[in-house]
Image (spheres, rainbow, N blue to C red):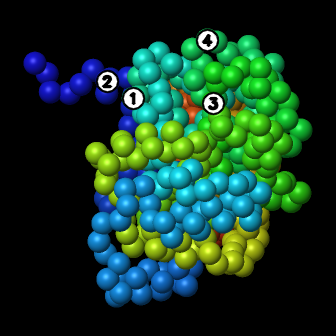
Amino acid sequence: MKLISNRLARFQPSLTVKISQKAREMTRDGIKVISLSSGEPDFDTPNHIKQFAIDSIQNGFTKYTQVDGTDELKDAIVNKFQDENNLSYRRNNITVGVGGKHVIYNLLMSSIDHEDEVIIPAPYWVSYPDIVSLCNGVPKIVETNFENGFKISPQELEKNISSKTKWFIINSPGNPTGSVYTSDELIALSNVLKKYEHINILSDDIYEHILYENSEFTNILNVSPELNDRTFVINGVSKVFSMTGWRIGYGAGNEELIKSISKIQSQCTTNPCSISQMAAMYALQKDKKFLDEWLVRFDERKNFLLDFFRSVDGFKAYKPEGAFYLYVSCEGFIGKTYGVDKIIKDDYDFANFLLNNAKVAVVPGIAFGKSPYFRLSYATSLQELQKACDQIKESLKSLK
């Protein structure tokens, strides 16, 4: 009898994690690598949040809490949804997990049966399909394109609906593209979803506050509140407060789902870290003035990268409306050769070429279900980005 389950054969470790790990190993071996693969802000957690966490430790808030979050944190989340999103929930509609990924896993594990389908527009966040597969569901990937902003159309959504469709995932602002759905686009999608009452909507809003120029965040419930009982909203503190390592995510949905999620969580993690919960509660209660400066710097970096990639033949970069990623087509370099008979056959090869020759780590588009592209994060200093672009440009000279 083999030790490892057949279930694990259905998915692979996260490519973003794999590439970040390889970059760290190269650095450890004395090779300086500029990593643009990680999905976390380079800014530190604001001092007032860190200090409140320290005070919580000193005050002895270091014990077990309720399985799915303290009442105080849930109240802060309820208030956040009301004040920022005009969405009304109560405590029993809220769950808190060990990061947004954990909440998504708990949600799908508690609701998906064998061969239930989940519609996922591509490009997508790397973990969506694998979590679905791990839960014995079937990821139904719907490809989008550059020309329509990497957003699924109502026609494509309806064409992919079947009697087995359980969930539709929408991520806006999106990872890896930074695309943002407008109110009109969400209305059009909701008009389709209203016709199919067996379909639930997972709205991943983790990048809601990272927006540029005239982009506005809208949740699908803002335009179609009648979908409330069928919509589960995911959010967290990782991106907006630069609290990736604190591992607090949360979700809001109908009470039946919340109870099911709590049942799963009680048998795997017990509760999220008590200290992190206190810090998250405090973060949600205070203003986000620090974010103004962060957005200015993100925008400056984004514009620098757009100018660079538009200046180099072979690249085609999508202009993000939110988040902190650039999704770049490398189609112009597919088929190129370098070294001794080395051929760039796809975006995975191109990402490896950049890592080994430019010493710059990016994530190939295949990880997000859309090739030939690569994603890079500009959650690093402008100086590092300038250096990375210089190294990329120099490395391209070796291609034939």
Quote the CA–CA distance across marks 1 and 4: 21 Å
- Disc number placed over residue 190 in the picture, else none: none
* Residue 232 found in image quarter: top right
Give the structural element (helix, strand or loop) at label 4: loop
* Residue 58 found in image quarter: bottom left
Horizontal and vertical percent for residue 57? 35, 82
- Give the class, few, some or many, for how many residues have Cα within 10 Å of label 3's Cα (few <14, many ≥20): many
- Give the class, few, some or many, for how many residues have Cα within 10 Å of label 4's Cα (few <14, many ≥20): few
Q: Earlier in the sequence, mark 1 or mark 3?
A: 1
- Disc number placed over residue 163 in the picture, else none: 4
Asked whether residue 326 is in view, the answer is no
Along the viewing direction, whichever of 237 and 321 lies nearer the viewer: 237
Give the structural element (helix, strand or loop) at label 3: strand
Quote the CA–CA distance across marks 1 and 3: 19 Å
- Disc number placed over residue 7 in the picture, else none: 2
Q: Residue at x 47, y 15 (%)?
A: 115
Q: Nearer the viewer, mark 1 or mark 3?
A: 3
> In the image, what residue type sits under mark 1?
Leu
**Residue under pointer 1:** 134
Do labels 2 and 1 touch, CB within 8 Å?
yes
- Disc number placed over residue 200 in the picture, else none: 3
> In the image, what residue type sits under mark 2?
Arg
Quarter of the image with the C terminus is: top right
> In the image, what residue type sits under mark 3?
Asn
Quote the CA–CA distance across marks 2 and 1: 7 Å
Quarter of the image with the N terminus is: top left
Q: Nearer the viewer, mark 3 or mark 2?
A: 3
> In the image, what residue type sits under mark 4?
Ser
Do labels 1 and 3 touch, CB within 8 Å?
no
Residue 120's place in the image compared with 22, above or below, is above
